[in-house]
Amino acid sequence: MKDEWPLFEVFVRGKRGLNHVHVGSLHAADERMALTHARDLYTRRNEGVSIWVVRSSDITASTPDEKDPFFQPSGDKVYRHPTFYDIPDDVPHI
Amino acid sequence: MTQTATGAGAEAGEDRLEAHFDGVIAHDRRIEPRDWMPDAYRRTLVRQIAQHAHSEIIGMQPEGAWITRAPSLRRKAILFAKVQDEAGHGLYLYAAAETLGVDRADLTRRLIEGRQKYSSIFNYPTLSFADVGVIGWLVDGAAICNQVPLCRSSFGPYARAMVRICKEESFHQRQGYELLLTMMRGTEAQRAMVQDAVDRWWWPSLMMFGPPDEASPNSARSMAWKIKRHSNDELRQRFVDMTVPQAERLGVTLPDPELRWNPERGRHDFGTPDWDELKRVISGDGPCNEERIERRRTAHEDGAWVREAAAAHAAKQAAKRERKAS
Amino acid sequence: MREDDHVYLSLAEEQDDARWAFGTGFEDPLHGVDTSVPDGVDPAELAALCLGLGDDALIAAQRLAEWVTRAPELEEEVALANIGLDLLGQARLLLTRAGQVDGTGRSEDDLAYLRESDDFRNVRLVELPNGDFAFSVARLLVFSAHRLAVFERLAAGHADPVLRAVAAKGVKELTYHRQYAAEWVVRLGDGTDESHRRMQEGLDAVAPYIEELYRAADVRDEVGAVLAQVADAATLKLPAAESLEGDGRAGDHTPCLAPLLFEMQEVARALPGGQW
């Protein structure tokens, strides 16, 4: 849909000396808007905190709990897509 | 999809994964988004988190209507900040739901098409400014009772969102109670407003915990999965026990003639909410259901050109950057 | 100890009222600032300045509050509310200061709730109805660009330490508001045919009210440069400034102000002597 904004993951460093930590996600049309929204939503505009945003689709993730190749197709994306599970109940052993 | 696995192999794999999943739950560890999980667990979570998110967003409406009318600038600021928090909570929760692979836009569509529900409490009207205080005290109080245990929900992103939300909710409850205390020190008319608001919101607040346990078919499974940590009736009892002394301190009467301390149980006995009313409100026949959904739909549809424009601008900018790079 | 009790305890521990900024805790940003009127400052002039700037912020915040539950996306709900809350905070400080120095001893609430529309001193730009999102961001751009330029001057050199402190706090907030508005004007101007048309209409509708801002404080070079730069990036035309009759700072208002005030003041006036 052309009125839907992509998903961004937000990482915040609460104060100097700490790592950036993943705090959640949000929707934005582009990186700049994602930063503005992240500042509003996750830091309540607390100045001095550092924010990273990255498109969720740009993250490559490892799969520690998925050793069986059958479960590989969700691939390296940060979230599994549930359509992978959209297997009708009445189709045995596909 | 890789379709090399034979049926039997896949089943064996699934058993192993399910055993692993059950083990994580049994050890009170968290399930994370990319972990294998049973379909029904995923579906139950999506439904519960989406309903919760919708409730936060729809819940902005009954109180939001009073921001422009708040009778002091301090109350205006507090209420404005509170309703803003609710938008934030909705966003945290939609984000948690999206880790399960659903899109927020899709959940919003389901809400405005009436295919997903939200808390029945927000289908009651707010008739006076005292309602703002009573919503903070009783409705947010009930929400806290419901939500604090969810900070230990078995699904990691949900539990983490709830920790953030619960911290802010405790402000909400305190500001509500403080408003009521202040109003009770005011004029006779104000005290009457507070009592009237308590009379109207008490029973709907008790209904927020859901139907009685024997009529709540999905509860047992949700508890086994540690998506839910206490039964509806248990949480309702806890809420009543917490609220009675607060009502006494405030100087209001809770509208339940059967409400009394039971020294044997060490808890309060109380009357039975009108479960038929709850059913009616949940199924769409409450005083404000249509109005709430209509407002949300209008905002979403009126905003479509804005969202489209931002997406179009972003696409143009990206194309420009690409041209420059090549 | 019940298994959830540790969560309740951790909730109770955190008494971090600061995030309510001027809300429940009424944490006074003027703590430690001398509130007596310094020598050489005309109290009536200072009161009028604070009242005008306070009313601007109050009415602008009231309009922003009308966006609640109507914003084009949930993230924008949060952003618009932040801006509204900042302006409401500015209004409270400025009205308090106006009441302190004008000799009447009126509180922020006396000033907000007990005056009639011709006693309000806000510029007419802020009282206009919200219109669509394009009109609202066009207004926010003009309003915040002007207010920022004014506040920078006040923060740097006004003789009243209270007004200086209020302005210094406001500069940070307004910088963000201007940025937010400018980004949206550019997005909508550049986005789609429909958004371009709406954004141009928004700018056109706002333009006649700009000259009144310059009459209140003539920072036209600075504001004009900002507006030109944003309009250019947004592929929009900045309409020629024409001037309207009347002046909000003198109590002239459009018919839009009275209903806004009626709504704002209704509850407070219905319960005289009420405690809130």
Image (spheres, rainbow, N blue to C red):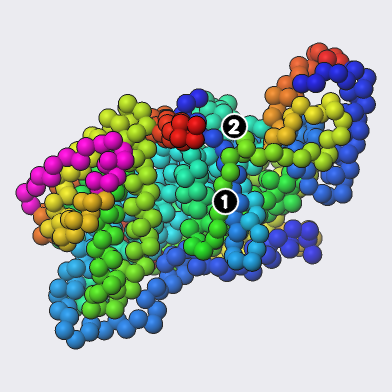
* x then y, percent, for residue A38: 52, 50
Q: Does C240 appear in magenta? A: yes
Q: Is residue B190 visible?
A: no
* x then y, percent, for residue C111: 24, 65
Residue at image mark 1: A52
**Disc 1 marks which amino acid?**
Trp
Residue at image mark 2: B103
**Disc 2 marks which amino acid?**
Asp
**Marks 1 and 2 share the same chain:** no
Q: Using the image, determine if residue B168 lies above or below residue A91.
A: below
Q: Which residue does the image show at 68% across and 62% down from the upper left?
A: C8
Q: Which residue does the image show at 69% across and 29% down from the upper left?
A: A81
Q: Chain of mark 1?
A: A
Residue C199 figure quarter: top left
Q: Which residue does the image show at 24% across and 46% down from the upper left?
A: C228
Q: Does C148 appear in magenta? A: no
Choose between C201 and B284: the one closer to the eye.
C201
Label 1: few (<14), some or many (≥20) within 10 Å?
A: some
> From the image, which quarter does the N terminus of chain C lie in?
bottom right
* x then y, percent, for residue C167: 31, 68
Q: Using the image, determine if residue B121 lies above or below residue C211.
A: above
Give the residues in magenta: C227-246
In the figure, is residue C228 to the left or right of A74?
Answer: left
Looking at the image, which residue sits at the far top?
A91
Choose between C35 and A50: the one closer to the eye.
A50
Choose between B320 and C32: the one closer to the eye.
B320
Q: Chain of mark 2?
A: B
Could you tell me what secondary structure mostly forms the magenta stretch? loop
* x then y, percent, for residue B100: 68, 35
Secondary element type, mark 1: strand
